[in-house]
Amino acid sequence: MDQLKPMDTTDTLLYLTRRVLQALAVILIVTIVVFCLLHALPGGPARGILGPQATGEQIAAFNHEQGLDRPLPVQYVYYLNTLLHGDLGTSYTLNEAVLRLIEQRLPKTLVLTVLSALVGLLLAVPLGMWQAVRRNKPADYVITTLSFVAYSTPVYFLGLILVLLFTQTLRWFPSQAPQGDTLAQVFADPAALVLPVVTGAASMIAVFSRYMRAATLENLSEDYVRTARAGGSRQGAILFRHVFRNSLTPVIAMLGYYVPVLFGGALVVEQLFNYPGMGLLFWSAAQSSDYPVLLGCVLVISVATVVGTLVADVVQRVVDPRVKGGRA
Amino acid sequence: MSAAQGGRFRSAGRWGLVAPRGGAANRRRPAPLIARFARNKLAVAGVLVVALFLFFCFVGPLLYSTDQTHTDLTQVNLPPSGTHWLGTDAVGHDELGRLMYGGKISLLVGLAAGLLATVIGTLWGAVAGYAGGWVDAVMMRVVDAGIAIPALFILLVVSAITSPGPLGLIVILGLVSWLVPSRLVRAETLTLKNRDYVLTLRATGGTHGRAIVRHILPNSVSTIVVAATFQVADAILLVAYVSYLGLGVQPPSTDWGGMLSAGLTAAYSGRWWLIVPPGLAIILVVCAFNAIGDGLRDAFDVRGR
C-alpha cells in the first residue's frame, strides 16, 4: 500500500476531472467503433435509414443528399452531431425511432435488473460475511464451490432448469414473465416475476458473496477490530457496527463495474422468459438484422458501462483514499 | 477491475540481473512448478475433466458412431434407452452422438478463440507498456473503450452482420475478447521494461522489437499462460451464449450452446435429456478451465483476474 496521505480537495478534484475526461475519450472511441460498424453494414448507413427494401438509386440519391459520399472523417462529425441531437436512427422492422423504442423498453429492463441486483445483494452480503467468519470451515468450502459452479453456468441453462423444475414439474410459477406495458402491470403479477428475478440474481450471488467475503476478511484483520476486541466488544457487535459498514460500501461500489454483466443477464433472461424489455428488443433485432436498433442499444449500454465504471472508481477512491489514481 | 485489487505487488527481481532466455521460465525449475500445480487437487481434476472431454468428443465418435448429418423423422424425441443412451432430439439425431459432435466445435472454437485473444492481447499490452507515454495512453483508452462495449452484445451484432461459420466465430471472438490479457501483460511489461538486462540490450544497440520478443514476452510467460487459460473458459461460455441466442454455429452443424437453443420447448414437454447433458457439459468444461487457471496462477505465483 502507498503511504497514507490525508485527502485534500484539490487532489480529489484533479482526479475527478481526469477521470471524467478519460470517460469522455472512451465514449468517443465507442462512437467511432459503432460508426465503423454502421459503415460495415451491407448497404451502409443509407440502408440503415431507408430500410432493406430501398433500391440502389434511392440509396445513391440519399447518400448524395445526406453527404454520405463525402470523406469518412467528415461523415463521422455529422454522425456525432446527430447523436448529440438524440437521433439514433430508425428501426427497420418496427418503423419507429430507435431512441423512442429504447425509452419504452429500458424502464422494464431496469425493474428486472434492479430487482435481481437487490435480491442478489440481500443474499450475497450475509452469505459472504458468514463465509468470512467461518473461514476454511465446511460451510465456507461448500458456498465457495457453489459460487465457482454458478460462475461457470450459462444463465439460460439455469433458467431452463428452473422452468423444468418449478413450471413443468412443481407448477409453482409461470415461465412467462409479466407482459404488461406499464410498470404497474408488471408488478401486478409478482408470481410471474419470481423465475426471471431468481435467474438474474444467481450469478450476482456467486460474484458478490466472493467480494463480501474478501472485504470482510480484510476488515477483520484491521487494527481497529483488534482494538475493539481488546476493549471488550463482543464479536457480533464488532461485526455489525464496524466490519459490516466498512465492507459494504466497496462491495456496493463494485456494482458499477457490474453494469455490462447486468445488461448481458437481462438479454438472456428477457429472451428466455419473454419479458418485453431492452434485452428482448436487442435479441429480436439480432434475429431480424435490425441494425439501427442493435447499434443504438450497443451505444446506450456502452455509455451506461462507462458511467458505471466511473462512479465505481470515484466511490472507491472517496471511501478508501489508499486507492490511488485508478487505472492507467 | 482496476483499483480495487491494488496493493499486492509481485516480488520484483526474481531473476536478478541475468536475463533468462526464451522459454527459460519453463526450463529453470521444472519440478517445483509441476509439483506446486499438482498439490492443487481441484486443478488436477480440471486437467482430468478436460482430457476426458477431449477423448469423449474426438475419439468417442469412433466408438459410438451415429449419423449427425441426416435427420430421421421416425426416431424423434425418444427418451433415453438401450439403443439411444441419451435419447434423440426433435429431428431424430442421437443425443449422445450430438453431444460429441457439438462438443468438438465448442472445444475447438473455445480453445482457438481463447488463444487468439491471448496472442492479440499480449502483443497489444507489451507494445503499449513498452512504448509508454502518449502511445500507451491512446492504446489503453482503446482497451477501455473495448471493455466498455459489452462483449456479448458486440458479438451478437457482428454475428448478425456476418453470419459466421466456426472459423469466423473464432476470429470475431478473438477480436472481441483480447482486452483483459492486454491489461495484464501491459502491467507486467511496465515492471520489466526498466530491468537492467533490457536496458543493457538497448544500450548495446538492440532494437525495441528485440527487447520485447527476447526479454519482455519470455518473462511474462506465466502471466500469459494463466490469462490464456481463463480466456479459453470465457470463450467457451461466450460461444455457447451466442449459439444459444441463435447467431452462432448454424444447423446442421451445432455446438453445446446451439443444442440448448430449443431448450424452452424441450423444458415444456419435459424432455430433460435435451437440456441437461449439454448444459452440464458446458458447466463441467468451463469449471475445469477455471480450476486449471486458478491452479496455474497459484503455481506460477502471479496475480491477475
Image (cartoon, coloured by chain):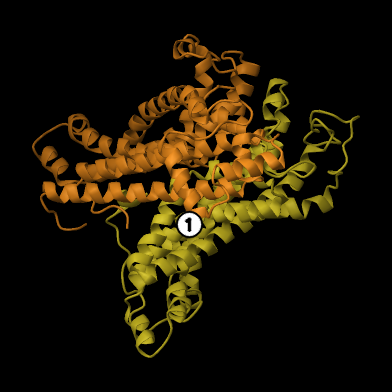
Furthest residue in direction top, as rendered:
A188
* Residue B111: quarter of image: bottom right
The chain letter of the orange chain reads: A
Q: Quadrant of residue A272?
A: top right
Whether residue B253 appears in this view of the structure is yes
Report the side of A50 relative to A203 (left or right).
Answer: right
Seen in the picture, residue B126 relative to A211 is either above or below; the reply is: below
Q: Nearer the viewer, residue A107 or A255?
A: A107
Chain letter for the residue marked with disc 1 in the picture: B
Q: Chain B drawn in what color?
A: yellow
Residue A319 relative to residue B92: left or right: left
Element at label 1: helix
Amino acid beneath label 1: Gly
- The residue located at (20%, 33%) in the rendering is A235
Q: Quadrant of residue B86?
A: top right
Nearest the viewer among B222 and A305 is: A305
How far across and how far down the image is residue B265, in percent?
Answer: 71, 24
| Image spot of residue B63 (x, y percent) | 83, 51
